[in-house]
Amino acid sequence: MGDSLETYASKAPVTGDRKLNLKLQSELPQPYLARALVAVDKDHPNGTEGKDHHNMSVLQQHVAFFDRNKDGIIYPWETYQGFQVLGFGFFISFTAAILLNLILSYRTQPGWLPSPVLSIHIKNIHRCKHGSDTETYDTEGRFDPSKFDAIFSKYGLTYSDALTKDEIFNMLRANANLGDFLGWIMSLGEWTLLYIIGKDENGLLQRETVRGVFDGSLFEQIEKQRASPY
């Protein structure tokens, strides 16, 4: 087999700097098969324990947290409420509600007419996948375990299952596609917000925290923690 399985090319040093996990095939069954319903990794081969996927794609589960009344449509005021529940203040919550619904609304509409209230239809959220991202979501909203694992094998150089702030920025810069300014800005915004709510006491973004944001379980966990009196 030899060269056919090699992941490093000496004349492309970047392939050595950003390594792939050669053990992934033995750690997780069929790691290159994108999963529609669950976000799996080596430690969670069946996805998030106890989470009901409701037959939604992993991308749909990610955004469904902001559908506060569970009618399949996210309105700006629901986006605002979701950010408030996660602990963001008025300014970030209001700005996120306006920008996200403004950017995402039209692509998810069932017809050609725009929504006057900037509604986002979860059924069509796959149309809003942007470039310059990790490609962990495929274009249909499935979860690709190999792409998720590559986040840490390529950029988690200090710790194997966590990212520092600098490593996150290095990843964002590396993933930026030529001319895709909007995609890069959206990725920057997403990871910045995730870092704010997800970093641990050492300023690290743990692997499980990142996996939890992909299927929305992190949002549910934070909401429960903030609602608990203890």
Image (cartoon, rainbow, N blue to C red):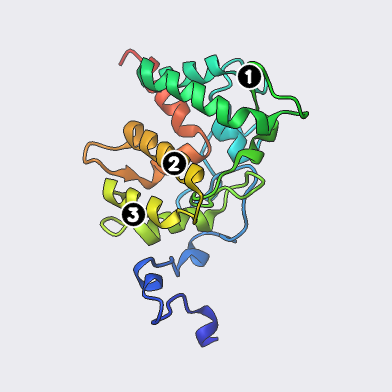
Q: Is residue 103 left or right of residue 210?
A: right
Q: Pick whichever, 141 or 188, lies toward us.
A: 188
Residue drawn at 54 percent across, 23 percent down: 66
Residue 4 position, x and y percent, is 55, 82
Residue drawn at 48 percent across, 17 percent down: 80
Query: Given contact means CB atoms under 8 Å apart, are the residues at marks 2 and 3 in contact?
Result: no
Look at mark 3 in the image and give the residue it sits on.
Answer: 170
Residue drawn at 37 percent across, 15 percent down: 90
- The amino acid type of the residue labelled 3 equals Asn
Residue 145 position, x and y percent, is 53, 54
Look at mark 2 in the image and give the residue it sits on.
Answer: 185
| Disc 3, SS | helix
Q: Is residue 51 left or right of residue 13?
A: right
Q: Pick whichever, 113 or 207, lies toward us.
A: 113
Q: Quadrant of residue 114?
A: top right
- The amino acid type of the residue labelled 2 equals Ile
Q: Disc 3 or disc 1, which is closer to the eye?
A: 3
Query: Given contact means CB atoms under 8 Å apart, are the residues at marks 1 and 2 in contact?
Result: no
In the rendered image, the quadrant that contains the C terminus is top left
Mark 1 Cα shell of 10 Å, populated few (<14), some (14-19), many (≥20): few
Q: Earlier in the sequence, mark 2 or mark 3?
A: 3
Q: Disc 2 or disc 3, which is closer to the eye?
A: 2
Residue 214, placed above or below residue 35: above
Look at mark 1 in the image and give the residue it sits on.
Answer: 70
